[in-house]
Image (cartoon, helix red, strand yellow):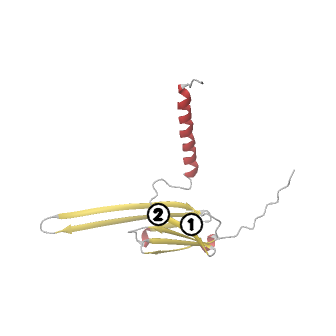
Amino acid sequence: MKKMNRNDRFDNVFDQFQSMFNQFQSYGKELELGSNVAVNIIEEEGKLVLTADLPGVQKEDISLKADENGVEISAESKQEIKEENEKYFRKERSSRKYNRRVAWPTDIDPETIKAKYEDGVLTVEAETEESDDEWNIDIE
């Protein structure tokens, strides 16, 4: 029976945390912490369709940047409610910021990107590109 060294357990835990941290750093370039934009991406009839829920946001308050690598959605929503009557006075304010960067799951043609916003849902469409790149590999 092998006697276990107490330090072995701590080294293993440290290695696991280091591995998780390294994974987080590599994923962090595509994902954003606290991104609160619900996004769906589907491929249909040779195009990608991305939908993002942005409730309570006005079209003028949305910033959309896209390229061949992905799309970045930023928006801000502000709301103020005032109520008064003879017995009470109420004033509430709320503010939300949305920010999300999403990588395209396949190659797209950046010239075909278009977007529309309707009823709190942002829709971004882009045509997919077929990649005909073929690599010849020399065998040694």
Name the spot of residue 83 as percent of width and height, x first. Answer: 21, 68
Name the spot of residue 101 as percent of width and height, x first. Answer: 53, 60
Q: Type of residue at label 2?
A: Ala
Q: Which residue is mark 2?
A: 38
Relative to the observer, which residue lies in front, 71 or 4?
A: 4
Relative to the observer, which residue lies in front, 61 or 17?
A: 17
Q: Which residue is mark 1?
A: 66
**Residue placed farthest to the left in the image?**
86
For numbered disc 1, what is the local secondary structure?
strand
Q: What crowding class fits label 2: few (fewer than 14 Cα within 10 Å), some (14-19), or many (20 or more)?
A: few
Name the spot of residue 27 as percent of width and height, x first. Answer: 56, 51
For numbered disc 2, what is the local secondary structure?
strand
Q: Please tell me which residue is depicted at 38% across the width and 65% down the height of the picture.
A: 77
- Residue 3 occupies which quadrant of the picture? top right
Relative to the observer, which residue lies in front, 75 or 28?
A: 28
Q: CA distance from mark 1 to mark 2?
A: 17 Å
Q: Please tell me which residue is depicted at 62% across the width and 76% down the height of the picture.
A: 45
Q: What crowding class fits label 1: few (fewer than 14 Cα within 10 Å), some (14-19), or many (20 or more)?
A: some
Name the spot of residue 18 as percent of width and height, x first. Answer: 56, 39
Q: Is residue 5 above or below residue 99?
A: above
- Residue 22 occupies which quadrant of the picture? top right
